[in-house]
Image (cartoon, rainbow, N blue to C red):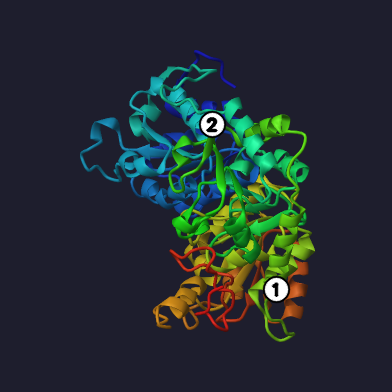
Amino acid sequence: MHSSDQTLNGSEIFFECLRREHVEYIFGYPGGSLLKVYETLHDVKDIEHILVRHEQGATHMAEGYARATGKPGVVLVTSGPGATNTVTGIANAYMDSSPMVVFTGQVPSSLIGNDAFQEADIVGITRSITKHNFLVKDVRELALTIRKAFFLATTGRPGPVLIDMPKDVLNASCPFHWPETVDIRGFKPTLICHLNQVEKAAQKIAQAKRPLLYIGGGVISAEASEELRAFAIEQNIPVTMTLQGLGAFPANHPLSMGMLGMHGTYWANQAVNNCDLLIAVGARFDDRVTGKIETFAPQAYKIHNDIDPTNVDKNVKVDLPIVGDARHFLASLREVMPEKSANREPWLEQINSWRESCPLSYSYDEQTLRTEFVIEEVSKQTAGNAVVVTDVGQHQMWTSQYFKFINPRSIITSGGLGTMGYGLPAAIGAAFGIKDRPVVLFCGDGGFMMNVQELVTAVHHKLPVKIFLINNSYLGMVRQWQELFHKEKYSFTDLGDSNPDFVKVAEAFGCKALLAETPAAARAAVSEALAWNDGPVLVEFRVVKKDMVFPMVPAGGSISDMLLARLNPKTMV
């Protein structure tokens, strides 16, 4: 490690800063404006550069790594198209609050604004999808800028930060100075919750006969799962989670109600409709959760704890806002709760009766393979201990319903942006971060093709990712909407004639591949894939072509009006 005040060029400063930030991996792709960085990288031994095959893949890998480990993911790409190819991944990380630092090369400072070769105003392009972004104008600013970027990405509500580095800045030299502390004017996130507000919340919770904990991904980001478990069990309060909150509370506990919202469980949504107190922690009242705002939790006094004050009262007006870190909120709440709370047994009995009246179910026979069966089988064979990555679509929703998430940081999925093509690179990133648990990817045939090139990256690094490809020959979720709400006009969602032979594709990339078309074959293939650790393995499951995910709340509908079955989709309950 270089000593402070030693003269270094911009590229050397870049790597020295990454060392100070304890960076393990850079997900990158070289190009003209970064040649000095890659020249320096040639002799760097303590940070591993992962050569992706597309810059979008780099951003999703960095996010998968971040979501699996809690550490910020790092991306390095060149100017122009290299930078613009990161936009989808940056937007995805921004929507899902994932810590990431993206470094882009830029044309020399003197050419900025001249439409130079491979120039793009990436700072302008990404302004609305980053927590903050920087254009470094002087090599003397580089170390402080990198320090600020990592601080911003990981402090408060996590998110992506971008640094644009002109070629001349990377070539220039100056004495290296590492700022041990950083102070950013205007950025002072509230971490400690106001005690008076916490005490008010405690009183309301103690009095509530029908309370409900509504948990989002912020609880996982804050490493607050232990505090949540302890509080929910002590107070005998049922817990429902968003897609990103799954695993914050163990699915095998009687108080767990699974996911709420558009494809949530019937009993979770009924509990929202009937609770007298809703305690939202680290969640943002997303439209896929609330449905029609006016009918969301109509009887409930609403408490909302979030580290980001802009999330409070944004979508749903709440009665008691508490800004601060979720871990601090839950720990403080446990300390100030009154000794006695209302009897919740009748409430839990009511929830159990809803659970029994409308359980999650699917038809089964020995010749027909359904996605639900595949996911349930993987859940059983991994005992819920896998890190599960999904792409976007029907399989994503079935995963939220049928996989039993026991631990936090066990589901890595694109929530806010819904990015097809996210799954494969995100699973690769997760596999770099997690070595002691199996990394499993559920991916549809549509999304798999969007970033299939990253299979090379997985094969090259011998990453033991289990790629479970759900092939229904359709863009399944879009087809479902076309059937229910668009006169069964299946416009450009049938992939049957255009899909490749996925087993041959995987083998051409050097990946072990299997095929399963029945439940018995699926069971055996899952077992074989989980036992295979000499690189990635792909299993193609040829499943029912026209299956649908239920329960379902139609867009803009009330969560009390759920479509429960395919047989009579016009009937709402």
Where in the figure is residue 296, as x and y percent of width and height? 51, 56
Residue count near mark 1 (Cα–Cα under 10 Å), binned few <14, some 14–19, many ≥20: many
For residue 101, side relative to residue 528 (left or right): left
Instruction: Give the residue drawn at x 51%, y 74%.
Output: 476
Q: Is residue 425 left or right of residue 365?
A: left
In which quadrant of the rendered view does residue 163 lie? top left
Numbered badge on residue 155? 2
Q: Quadrant of the C terminus?
A: bottom right
Q: Residue at x 24, y 35 (%)?
A: 111
In this rendering, does residue 192 appear at all?
Answer: no
Query: The N terminus lies in which quarter of the figure?
Result: top right
Residue 120 location, quadrant: top left
Q: Which residue is mark 1?
A: 373
- Return the x and y of residue 553 as percentages of the image width and height: 51, 67
Amino acid type of the residue tagged 2 in the rendering: Thr
Q: Position of residue 3 (x, y in %)?
A: 56, 15
Q: Position of residue 10 (x, y in %)?
A: 43, 26
- Residue at the far left: name it: 114
Q: Is residue 82 left or right of residue 383?
A: left
The residue depicted at 47 percent of the width and 40 percent of the height is: 312
- Tag 1's secondary structure? helix
Residue situated in front as seen by the camera: 509 or 102: 102
Q: Are marks 2 and 1 in contact (CB under 8 Å)?
A: no
Dot 1 amino acid type: Phe
